[in-house]
Image (cartoon, rainbow, N blue to C red):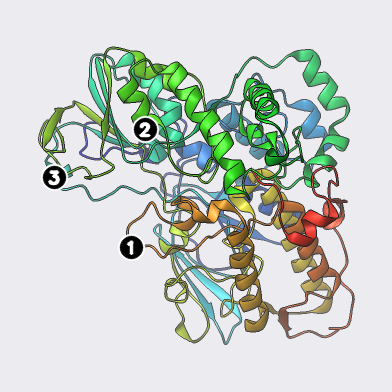
Amino acid sequence: MMLKVTSGDPSVSSDSKVENNRDAEVDVAFDAVIVGAGFAGMYMLHRLRGLGLSARVYEAGGGVGGTWYWNRYPGARCDIMSMQYSYSFSEELDQEWSWSEKYSPQPEILNYANHVADRFELRQDIHFDTRVTAAVFDEEAKCWRIETDQGDQVSAQFCIMAVGCLSAANLPPFEGIKDFEGPVYHTGEWPHEGVDFTGLRVGVIGTGSSAIQSIPIIAEQATALTVFQRTPNYSVPAWNEKLDPEEERTIKAGYPELRAKMRGRPTGFYFEFNAQPALEATEEERERQYEEFWNRGGLPFLGAYGDLLFEKEANDTIAEFGRRKIREVVKDPATADLLCPDNVFGGKRLCVDTGYFETYNLPHVSLVDVSEAPIERFTKQGIVANGVEYPVDAVVCATGFAAMTGSFDNIKITGKNGLALTEKWRAGPRTYLGLSSVGFPNLFMITGPGSPSVLASMIQAIEQHVDWMADCIGHMRDIGAQTIEPTLKYEDEWVDHVNEVAKISLRSTASSWYLGANVPGRPRVFMPYIGGFPIYVDKCNQVMTNGFEGFELDGTRNSDAAPKVRLTERWRVPVDMDVISPAAIAARRVPIV
């Protein structure tokens, strides 16, 4: 596809489940409409079916998988270990699926998503290639009116947003981009037929996670590769390898116990963690500890000490270790200096790589610093930065996403009294528990802003939210409630708590997409809940046990009935005290990755 801006349009996908010429659904009523058929939307559908409710899922893409459907760029893979990055609701599913690598590549994760859709017969309730354009709450009928770009006009008691935290691609409005004669790709909307860069001069804009994963592979094909870097990033080697069959059998034999441990960890996944403060260790002890955790690789590197994201002096020690590792690999001192970050280690999402820094030793790879002066413009045959035109035949924009709220912004969501969600969130998202927002009854948000979401293992965070929502909806059916909505007092208190907890972590000091800093004009608000996954889950459980405290249920016939725990029992696990001591909980200083 030789378009000015090339994306993974489902109409060109080789595996698209395109529904040709289906009739639009008009004046059809469902119990629930789910927006998105990624891991969140699929699991929500499965749980609603279990309650005996009717549901329709609308998915913009041509198949299931969400982020793993769209993000097909070279080298795309998960940064959570494969044996933990999967659904936990079905022991049979746990046992029957096998992963091939320590860290799963995108095609394998997408295969897993398709397997789940087939195994649980989910596709029959999903309309693909259908983008929801509007959701309006009808106050008189107490239901949501949903419209799509395929002419659907349906109603539902519940509207459930399963749109993902990183699904609205951010393509900066570079001057002259329409004049560029070559293709422009975004890593988050990669062509499904793949891209062959053989013999081409390629420019990559950005050095975040998708760039760090794709650059080594693009460099293998391209004649020349020019990387435009605004902010360098720390990255830890994955040390990825084939998964040992014996290790897999051992894990599967103890899967229930492993899942329980994961739920008790601040990150929602399990790894060895050292709670000792770095500043209490000698320099020699720290060096040995960092080296040992570095050789293990991946995100658990941040578990080398317990104070790394809370004490700047402690963080300085791991940051210097990370910079030294870069200088040991990159041969050209000037390039190594440009690749060395000077910000908080782990302040941004820590990247995990395979051969990223080694790539800069190749003679046809060059790094252009655009930190002081941004890219000036595109020309017909290149990119101009710092007054120099760099000739390129193709451009890859690894420029990230409008995180957490971007997909909400792309749908016209209107609540009570004509209030638009975009207007309410103009100064930053406001939710109660990241589940719902005042003024928008029966609108649920899976892993919404104000919940751990991207600071935890996403599938665990998804499952916990879905199970809570299913129990909530089940309770509403039990007592005859028509709507549920947070109260302003509890929403304000939760937003204040999310902000206060964020201040404790050094992550709040970093200019990252956690705060929306990667998109000009967005409010700077720390959007995920940083206080730890099990602490958050315990709060959700308390809210349910207390009769959905902080929510107003309307139209009940038996409001005093205690909520029935259907699905959330498995989330009522002890906090892992090996990692979070009572003193740490009291101080709200929970280790995070």
Looking at numbered disc 1 in the image, what kind of residue is underneath it? Answer: Gly
Residue drawn 22% across and 36% down? 3
- Picture coordinates of residue 308 (x, y %)? 63, 43
For the image, the number of numbered tags is: 3
Q: Residues within 10 Å of mark 2 (few under 14, many from 20)?
A: many
Looking at the image, residue 239 lies above or below residue 231: above
In this rendering, position of residue 31 left or right of residue 560? left
Image quarter in which the N terminus is found: top left
Of residues 331 and 230, which is closer to you in this image?
331
Distance between the alpha carbons at the discs numbered 2 and 3: 23 Å
Looking at the image, residue 276 lies above or below residue 526: above
Between tags 1 and 2, which lies in front?
Answer: 1
Looking at numbered disc 3 in the image, what kind of residue is underneath it? Answer: Gly
Asked which secondary structure carries label 1, the reply is loop
Mark toward the start of the polypeptide (3 vs 1): 3
In this rendering, position of residue 88 left or right of residue 327? right
- Picture coordinates of residue 400 (x, y %)? 40, 44
Looking at numbered disc 2 in the image, what kind of residue is underneath it? Answer: Pro
Q: Which residue is mark 3?
A: 176
Q: Residues within 10 Å of mark 1 (few under 14, many from 20)?
A: few
In this rendering, position of residue 568 left or right of residue 437? right
Of residues 272 and 540, which is closer to you in this image?
272
Between tags 3 and 1, which lies in front?
Answer: 1
Residue drawn 86% across and 70% down? 545
Image quarter in which the C terminus is found: top right
Could one spot residue 177 in this view of the protein? yes
Q: Which mark is residue 191?
A: 2
Q: Which residue is mark 1?
A: 521
Distance between the alpha carbons at the discs numbered 3 and 1: 21 Å
Name which quarter of the figure residue 427 lies in: bottom left
In this rendering, position of residue 190 left or right of residue 75? left
- Picture coordinates of residue 555 (x, y %)? 74, 86
